[in-house]
Image (cartoon, grey):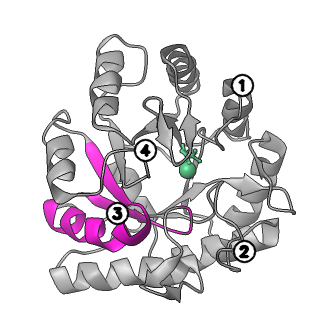
Amino acid sequence: MEKLIITAAICGAEVTKEQNPNVPYTVEEIVREAKSAVDAGAAIVHLHVREDDGKPTQSHVRFQECTEAILKECPNVILIPSTGGAVGMTPDERLDSTNTTPIPEMATLDCGTCNFGDEIFDNTMPTMRAFGKRMIEKGIKPEYECFEMGHLDTILTMARKGEVPGNPMQFNFVLGVPGCTPATVDNLCWLVNKIPAGSTWTATGIGRHAFTLAAPAIVMGGNVRVGFEDNLYLERGVLAKSNGELVDKVVRMAKLLGRQVATSDEAREILSLKKR
Ligand code: KMH
Ligand code: ZN
């Protein structure tokens, strides 16, 4: 089995300091959280950024500032900027996160429209085609985020048509968002059984499912994402003090289950990435 790639989704666009005071907003806070995650064993940081007051932004200027500051502290980490942004942002606004220099090695590509709590996360076919075209042109490897079972079929069809980058594909099955596919082992197996040979995949369990989905992913040979974007608690009733604490829990689970953890360079090899 390949080594386990741990991704830390350190910030997100929806969670707030009111829910957990350790959620980062400023550049300094974002760097602090990225470093805590990488020091604990994360090979990848999935990045959203905020204005100092916590408002989510996709501005490439802010992404540039945060990226440079993170890379100063964690020069080897793989950064996956979000192109999902926050619910309600326009496609053009969302894609601005990929306009940094150098362009990112990877970026998320969300694979369909879905309910997102009380809101709708809009990813129409034209939007996804535009994102796919941009990533093909710029040589950015997508992390295909599937929130619903049908998202997988949608993106595989688009890849067959050449509308988005194809093999080797990296999927992130984000399960347990209220209104979307539940975070069950059954659903995870259904998805994993349908991905093309040579693909890689990550499981992200939302809220109380963070670690119950991490465990099957570790033993099934997948990868794991945790972080404040997905879950604010280390265990029931105990707020996590940092993203590092959440990553450390996955590292300890992997050790118990006999799976080694990948460095960022090992993750690049597993994901067929070239460092920029
Ligand atoms: N903030 C969510 C609405 C992504 O990063 O690509 C979407 C999201 C997905 O976080
Ligand atoms: Zn995200």
Task: Indicate the secondary structure of the residue bearing disc 2.
Answer: loop
User: CB under 8 Å between callouts 3 and 1?
Assistant: no
Characterize the local packing of mark 4: few (<14), some (14-19) or many (20 or more) Cα atoms within 10 angstroms. some
Between the residue at mark 2 and the residue at mark 1, the CA separation in whole angstroms equals 30 Å
Characterize the local packing of mark 3: few (<14), some (14-19) or many (20 or more) Cα atoms within 10 angstroms. many
Judging by the rendered image, the residue that carries numbered circle 4 is 273
User: CB under 8 Å between callouts 2 and 1?
Assistant: no
Q: Nearer the viewer, mark 4 or mark 3?
A: 3
Between the residue at mark 2 and the residue at mark 4, the CA separation in whole angstroms equals 37 Å
Between the residue at mark 4 and the residue at mark 3, the CA separation in whole angstroms equals 18 Å
Question: Residue 163, relative to residue 142: is it above or below?
Answer: above
Labels 3 and 2: the sequence-earlier one: 2
Labels 4 and 1: the sequence-earlier one: 1
Between the residue at mark 4 and the residue at mark 1, the CA separation in whole angstroms equals 26 Å
Labels 4 and 3: the sequence-earlier one: 3
Q: Nearer the viewer, mark 2 or mark 1?
A: 2
Labels 2 and 4: the sequence-earlier one: 2
Between the residue at mark 3 and the residue at mark 2, the CA separation in whole angstroms equals 26 Å
Q: Name the residue located 61 percent from the left edge and 57 percent from the top edge.
A: 12
Judging by the rendered image, the residue that carries numbered circle 3 is 224
Characterize the local packing of mark 1: few (<14), some (14-19) or many (20 or more) Cα atoms within 10 angstroms. few
Amino acid at the residue labelled 3 = Val
Between the residue at mark 3 and the residue at mark 1, the CA separation in whole angstroms equals 29 Å
Q: Name the residue located 54 percent from the left edge and 26 percent from the top edge.
A: 135
Judging by the rendered image, the residue that carries numbered circle 2 is 18
Which dot marks residue 92? 1
Amino acid at the residue labelled 1 = Asp
Q: Nearer the viewer, mark 2 or mark 4?
A: 2
Q: Which residues are magenta?
A: 200-229
Q: Name the residue located 20 percent from the left edge and 49 percent from the top edge.
A: 187
Task: Indicate the secondary structure of the residue bearing disc 3.
Answer: strand
